[in-house]
Amino acid sequence: MSATDERVEPRVSASTLLERQRRAFIAAGPPSVALRRNRIDRLMALVLDNTDAFVDAMATDFGTRSRAASLFTEVVGIIPVIEHTRSHVPQWMKSTKLMRAARAAGFRAEVEPAPLGVVGIIGPWNFPLNLVVLPASAAFAAGNRVMIKMSEVTSHTAELMAELA
């Protein structure tokens, strides 16, 4: 599930992908609430539709971690957080007025949330799905595009993510 909604050739350099993502972000502009939620939904579907495959890949990567531990920490535990993120997208997109004292003096100050563009996520080895998917859902909620680099220590999980993404 690349943020450009295209399949990515496996041998394209990271700098080429980053440049493509930047151009796509600039061309499309900040995404709507619906598009942000759609990206979060697709990310959650990627995890839920492939739960067994992810658990198997992590079992191969870790060797000693139980399937139940991987299922709970990497899948079951993250779904409520993703749902919470999804439900708060409209609220988080609203501007926030600041400094009552400044307003009393006739000034106006607001914080206008705006996406950064392309966000890089470097996944650790110990929770390879959890600590990649949760930041990705937050980045999508903020209106960003995402590039993920999974840990080489969890190579089977990384390969599966690359195949599915």
Image (cartoon, rainbow, N blue to C red):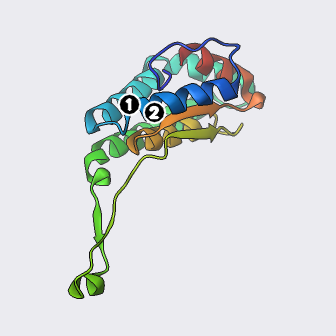
Residue drawn at point x = 57 percent, y = 37 percent: 132
Residue 47's tag is: none
Residue drawn at point x = 59 percent, y = 23 percent: 55
| Among the 4 quarters of the image, the one containing residue 111 | bottom left
Marks 1 and 2 sit apart, C-alpha to C-alpha, by 5 Å
User: How packed is label 2: few (under 14 Cα within 10 Å), some, or many (20 or more)?
Assistant: many
The kind of secondary structure element at disc 2 is helix
Q: Which residue is mark 2?
A: 25
Residue 106 position, x and y percent, is 22, 83
Residue drawn at point x = 45 percent, y = 35 percent: 26
Q: Would residue 98 appear left or right of 81 to someone viewing this image? A: left
Residue 28's tag is: 1
Closest to the observer, 154 or 7: 7
The kind of secondary structure element at disc 1 is helix
Q: Amino acid at mark 2?
A: Phe
Assess whether mark 2 and mark 1 are in contact (beta carbons under 8 angstroms): yes
User: How packed is label 1: few (under 14 Cα within 10 Å), some, or many (20 or more)?
Assistant: few
Closest to the observer, 155 or 141: 141
Q: Amino acid at mark 1?
A: Ala
Q: Would residue 105 appear left or right of 77 to someone viewing this image? A: left
Is the residue 131 above or below the residue 109 in the image?
above
Closest to the observer, 38 or 51: 38
Q: Would residue 116 appear left or right of 124 to someone viewing this image? A: left
Closest to the observer, 82 or 20: 20
Residue 70 position, x and y percent, is 59, 32
Residue drawn at point x = 36 percent, y = 45 percent: 85
Total tally of numbered discs in the picture:
2
Residue 66 position, x and y percent, is 64, 29
